[in-house]
Amino acid sequence: MTGLRIAQIYDELGLDRVWDADKVVALIDHWIPAGKVDEAIIHQKCREFVEKYNIKNWLGMREGICHAVFPQKGFVKPGDLIVGSDSHTTTYGALGAFSTGIGSTDMAMVLATGELWFKVPATIKFDISGKIPKFIMGKDIILRIIGDIGVEGATYKTMEYAGEAVKELSIDGRFTLSNMAIEAGAKAGIIEPDEKTVEWVKSRTREEFQVVRNDPDATFEEVIKMDISRLEPQVAKPPSPGNTVPVSEVEGIKIDQAFIGSCTNGRMEDMRAAAKILKGRVIPKEVRCIVIPASKEVYIQAMHEGLFDIFLEAGCVICNPHCGPCIGGSSGVLGPGEVCISSSNRNFIGRMGSKESKVYLASPYTVAASAVKGEITDPRKI
């Protein structure tokens, strides 16, 4: 999405080189395929830029959303320093990288010089204990955290997730925690690599990497302890990811649309969770349920596992891997007065279309259960 602006800054500043083209990874994940002339122009300028500067790791529009694709393709390793021109670049912290989003001007300068100034952020450690209850996912945990500390509770700080519950989470679930660190204002969201991390990364890359862990005497600005053993499914009410309540407080609210996907919850674990709820059930005709796998890899795997059969028989619409309605771009934009429950990361006013629409955030379990009932529903009751 920001490729056009980066190219414009290059022209404005007279920049004529990329510092190290081999260290750049680029793709298009917004509005694909292009549905408007303006979108086609943005894509066109991105293609011209990568061709002009010989960007080897150019993935085009075939692979899906960058925050799912880049780790799957082996471009993210523990100990890496990664910057991206999207705020949800914090996702890669799930693998023990320091990764953060930067603006278009900063990205243009990084591309040209390979340098950028950072203030080292203080760290808030979240010690998350307790066995994860059934039908609770990483999304429920991070929504509860943001609900507790607020959307400015970790501004320009690192959120470090630790504890037995984090170790129990799958890599997919950990990606969700790190992805939404930015929704609390964090600069990064990091999970210290364990054997699960190392095995996952080794299955994706042959490159050497150095696992970085805390020093034995590491100090934190704050340590927040959280026991999730009795955590209910969580829902963030509009218009903020911090407006989080247990699902029991919003049950019964009628919905027009359910969205399962995005860089937050469009991975295989999320597809399987939704399919578990939807199998053998039919979504009411007045409800639209949109499923968008986050990457081509997830798309193919879900298809091979028969999940698409489940989705289609339930009445879902399946789209090609891309950001879709998460940013109000395509494939499910909301009209005035419509209500959507979504597995994405933001529910700001107008985020998914009309400023008069409303978006509730929840896990794929809760989204799928709500689609079945036509109203916000506790998945444990399904």
Image (tube, rainbow, N blue to C red):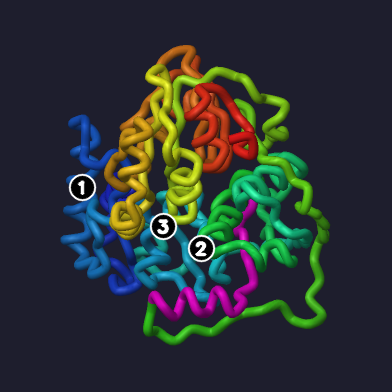
**Amino acid type for the residue under numbered disc 2:** Tyr
- Across and down, in percent, residue 16 comes to 24, 62
**Amino acid type for the residue under numbered disc 3:** Ala
Earlier sequence position, callout 1 versus callout 2: 1
Q: Please identify the quarter of the rendering in which residue 70 is found.
A: bottom left
Q: Residue at x 43, y 56 (%)?
A: 268
Q: Is residue 220 above or below residue 103?
A: below
Q: Residue at x 50, y 15 (%)?
A: 356
Give the magenta part as a residue range: 185-204
- Across and down, in percent, residue 143 comes to 66, 43
Secondary structure beneath dot 3 equals helix
Secondary structure beneath dot 1 equals helix
Earlier sequence position, callout 2 versus callout 3: 3
- Which residue position holds label 3? 68
Q: Is residue 168 above or below residue 344?
A: below
17 or 342: which is nearer to us? 342
221 or 344: which is nearer to us? 344
Instruction: Please tell me the numbered disc located at residue 45.
Output: 1
Q: Nearer the viewer, mark 1 or mark 2?
A: 2
